[in-house]
Amino acid sequence: MSKLTNKLVAIAAMSAFTAGSAVAADLTVVSWGGAYTKSQVEAYHKPWMASTGKTIVSEDYGGGIAEIKAQVESGNVTWDVVDVELSDAIRACDEGLLEEIDPSMLPAAPDGTPAVDDFLPGTLHDCAVSNIIWSSVYVYDSSKVRNWNAPKTMADFFNTDAYPGKRGMRKNPKVTLEFALIADGVPTSEVYDVLGTEEGVARAFAKLDTIKDDIVWWEAGAQPPQLLADGEVIFTTAWNGRVFNAVAAEDQTFEMVWDGQVYDLDLWVIPKGSKNKEAAMDFVAFSTATEQLAAQASWISYGPARASSVAKIGTYHDNPAINMADHMPTAPANFKNALQNDFEFWADNADELNERFNSWLAK
Amino acid sequence: MNTISENMNKAPIVAADGTPLKKKLAQAMFRSRLRAAGLVLPLFGFVLASFVIPIFALMWQGVYNDTFERLMPATTIQLAAWDGVSEPTEDMYAALVADLIVARKEKTAGKVGSRVNQQLSGARSLFTGTARKAHKLEAPFKESVIKTKKKWGQIEYWQAMKLTSDSLTPGFYASSVDKTLTVTGDFVAVDENRQIYVKLFIRTFMISGSVMLMCLILGYPVAYLLATLPLKTSNLLMIMVLLPFWTSLLVRTTAWIAILQSQGVINDLLVWIGIAADDGRFSLIYNMTGTIVAMTHILLPFMILPLYSVMKTIPPSYMRAARSLGATPTLAFIKVYMPQTIPGVGAGGLLVFILAIGYYITPALVGGQDGQLISNMIAYHMQKSLNWSLAAALGGILLGCVLLLYWAYDRIIGIDNMKLG
């Protein structure tokens, strides 16, 4: 009974999520859309199609593993390669929704270093291969600074006396609570230890309380640059690549504050039962080669996950004056007070903290 | 005349082939009914397969979740015999290790962990972490298991496992009303900091009610004009109603963002007039106000169209008759016209209200912190937390409320009186 109901529900859920886009292609690659997908199409899809003669259909989604779960459980897997966040990759792998990926099939670096040693620590997993490192930071519009001292620390984001006005934040406890604790003076190395205790959570919410009335909440990655450009907020948290894109491609005068950035990985995964598993494996290996990762970084400021690619990062594809390496989350100047998102912590506590967060919002 | 009817009673009229005409007629009717049923069948099948069965399957998930029982069979047997309060026994730990070794091989430890985590935070990594080491553990298992992760010594985690090992459970419905099921079978309120769903249900109904009321207040005069103005003018008015109706939901919602935001048109106007100071602009969006305004605008046609279709059928002569009998225009309107529009008011009101309680995109975009509806939580549990059972329970409550409303409507106004178009 349960298997059947699961299947039925999965089919129903799937038909709700995907609008039945069954295009005949050799490979369906799914990612987050916008400037980010564009960077992948230019750096990964096009060269792969050229070298293999196969076609790729690129689809967008909004993150999460619900669609993968629905497809795998209904036995109708239409996605072959998906770009997911680390916590989702680990979770989907643990729940048996993903194909295992043997790291030995990944191409070695140009100097012969095997892939396992070339990928940055923590970027290779049982079912996932990382392509980029991205970061949550906060931003302000330097053209609208009214006799300010430019904000420099995470504490400034919470300082409504020195910087009065609305602030944009992502409507999600993840990263938001970390930011609050960092602003409250918790060293980045201790953030998750503190957040793991009842008092720590209370402390984070108490810090958020101080600016609660001034927060405008956003949910989609495209919103924060828009909020800032509209003058709706004076500060907003955002994903660094989206901000970079607004600056480089749309001539906005946004400045990022890198203090207390929370960085995370995006990884390729292959849903279990993919109909084009071999091509999918081949694509994952191809796109995470040194050259491709470096080429991707010339389109958007997300850092490649391989050491050998980091060394090859060039300039922005549209403007040779912009040196991409300086804009990466991992650039030494930006990386001074950075925190890596703890996927284990969030896998354990997301449900409870999300309820607390929503309850706090509703108060 | 008399004789004919007597004849009819005595001998039935027969057709040419000798069968009674009545029977013949019934046969013909049956065939045409069969044909009609045949035409309906594809739709019926479609509705059944794509609507009724998935709904029941999902509702079933709200009370039935066998993840734990299916994937941890030995532990489930041990837990069934356990009273839930005494110290966990060595046998229970041994069964746990045996199950976890299999779970590691089958890659299901994460699934079990997530299920228990729904009952008690922190259980997920406990399962995945221990499963990784399970094959190396040796007897006595109680000691070695607690040595790998100290949490295994805490009785709360065993109680959570006992609770999740019951496949048929009221636990998800309890969670949807901010209660939690304890191992002794009681329902206790969850920590005040985590209570959210009851609040959201109430807010959802309040916002839906306000939207319905706003739609009625704004829509009634428009529908009246549509029904009474000369065709040329009413056509133009109709276009103005339908044009936004045909525009994408997303476009209309984002348009409201542009209009209502603090640097938007309305606020600029208010500052220009002098009602608001430049640094004291009103927050008209990213809160409940924004949600109500945008939803009212989006749902307005669903109120106007049923109202219009009812008003169109009311003969103007009734009002004239009331006037000629001495009623003032207001009295004639209230006593004669309005009662006749009740079927339209009911239909529009019910339609708007039911659509509003399921609204999702608009509150997600313009809702901010106090304009969220319960549907946003259901979407969260479907897409992000993957707690489909809780989503099903929340959806079940919502569905129950709609049915209750429908029933009440039927009792008070009568569903036969509803006119949708």
Image (cartoon, coloured by chain):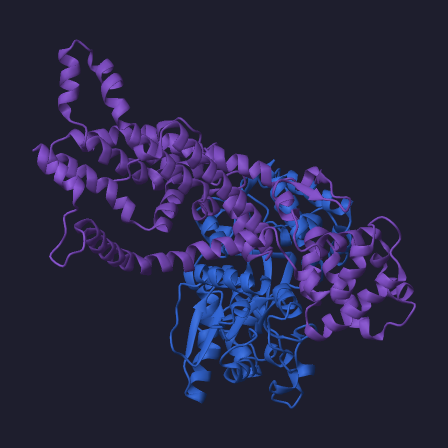
Q: Nearer the viewer, residue B51 or B143?
A: B51
Chain seen in blue: A
Indicate the quadrant where residue B409 lies.
Answer: top left
* Residue A279, horizontal then vertical, whole percent: 50, 84
Residue drawn 29% across the image and 32% down it: B344
Res A64 visible = no
The residue sitting at 41% across, 75% down in the picture is A57
Q: Colour of chain B?
A: purple
Q: Residue B116 placed where, x, y %?
A: 71, 56
Residue in front for this viewpoint, A338 or B123: B123
The residue drawn where x is 72% and y is 46% is A201
Residue B369 visible to an observer of this rendering: yes
Place of residue B11 in the rendered image (x, y in percent of width and height, measured from the top left): 16, 45
User: For residue B414, which quarter of the picture?
Assistant: top left
Q: Quadrant of the C terminus of chain A?
A: top right
- Position of B239 relative to A138 (above/below): above
Count of numbered circles in the view: 0
Q: Is residue B325 above or below residue A185?
A: above
Q: Is residue B206 above or below residue A73?
A: above
The foreground one among B279 and A62 is A62
In the visual, does A294 lie left or right of B308?
A: right
| For residue B359, side relative to residue A325 (left or right) | left
| Residue at the limit of the structure toward the left, as seen here | B1
**Residue A362 appears left or right of A189:** left
Of all residues, the one furthest to the top in this rendering is B326
Q: Which quarter of the rendered picture does the N terminus of chain A lie within?
A: bottom right
Vertical comparison of A233 with A349: above or below: above
**Residue A145, image x and y in percent?**
52, 46
